[in-house]
Structure formats: C-alpha cells, structure tokens
Image (cartoon, grey):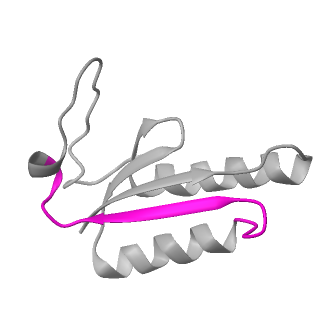
Amino acid sequence: MWILATYDINTETAKGRRRLKKVAKICEGFGQRVQKSVFECTLSPTQYEQFKHRLVSNIDESEDSLRIYKLTQGRPNTVEEFGVNEVRDLSGPIIV
C-alpha cells in the first residue's frame, strides 16, 4: 500500500525535541521525506502496522499530531509534482 505520513510534534520542550527526532528517524526507515514533516512510503500490510505502532508509541497524543493517509491509486495516479523533486523508487530495498 502507498501511504503519506505527516506529523507535527510540539518541540517547546526537550522531550518534544527528542520525540521529533525519534518520529523522523522512524519515518526515514520506512519511506522517503518529501517535505520536512511529510513522508511517502510503500508498505505491506504488516509493515504498515509496524510503522503505525512505532509512530503512535513515540508521540504524545496530548501535544502532537500524526496523520497517515492511505492512497489507493498509487503515486503515479495521485501526485502532481512541480519544482525540485528527488524521488526514490520505493518498490526496491531502502538502505539508510
């Protein structure tokens, strides 16, 4: 499945800044950053559940926001890009 994950982590405290780093690292391990807090990922159903669990476990739901969009038509049919675009092929292995 193809998903778009976005987050807004409250970084007013040291704990918030640590959460931000953890969440970004998790997302980098599953997909590619397309904007500062926006990631595109191609995941199997099992990977999706792992991804979601890890993210939810690392946010503070009283201070942070996490949104995961499941995009059913796939990237080529859903995204129009303008400007600088460095897109990786997510169908193969991702080496971090």
Residue 13 is covered by the magenta coloring: no
| Left or right of residue 51, residue 7 in this image | right
User: Residue 88, percent across and down?
Assistant: 25, 39
Residue lying at the far right of the rendered structure: 13
User: Residue 26, percent across and down?
Assistant: 55, 57
Camera sees residue 96? no
| Left or right of residue 48, residue 55 in this image | right
Q: Residue at x 53, y 35 (%)?
A: 36
Q: Locate residue 59: give its quadrant.
A: bottom right
| Left or right of residue 17, residue 53 in this image | left
Q: Residue at x 21, y 30 (%)?
A: 81
User: Residue 7, percent across and down?
Assistant: 57, 53
Relative to 82, is 34 above or below? Answer: below
Camera sees residue 86? yes
| Left or right of residue 57, residue 5 in this image | left
Query: What are the residue bounds of the magenta stretch?
Result: 59-75
Residue 72 is covered by the magenta coloring: yes
Q: Nearer the viewer, residue 19 or 11?
A: 11
Which quarter of the figure is the C terminus placed in? top left
Residue lying at the far top of the rendered structure: 83
Q: Residue at x 42, y 48 (%)?
A: 39
Relative to 58, is 88 above or below? Answer: above
User: Residue 75, percent across and down?
Assistant: 17, 50
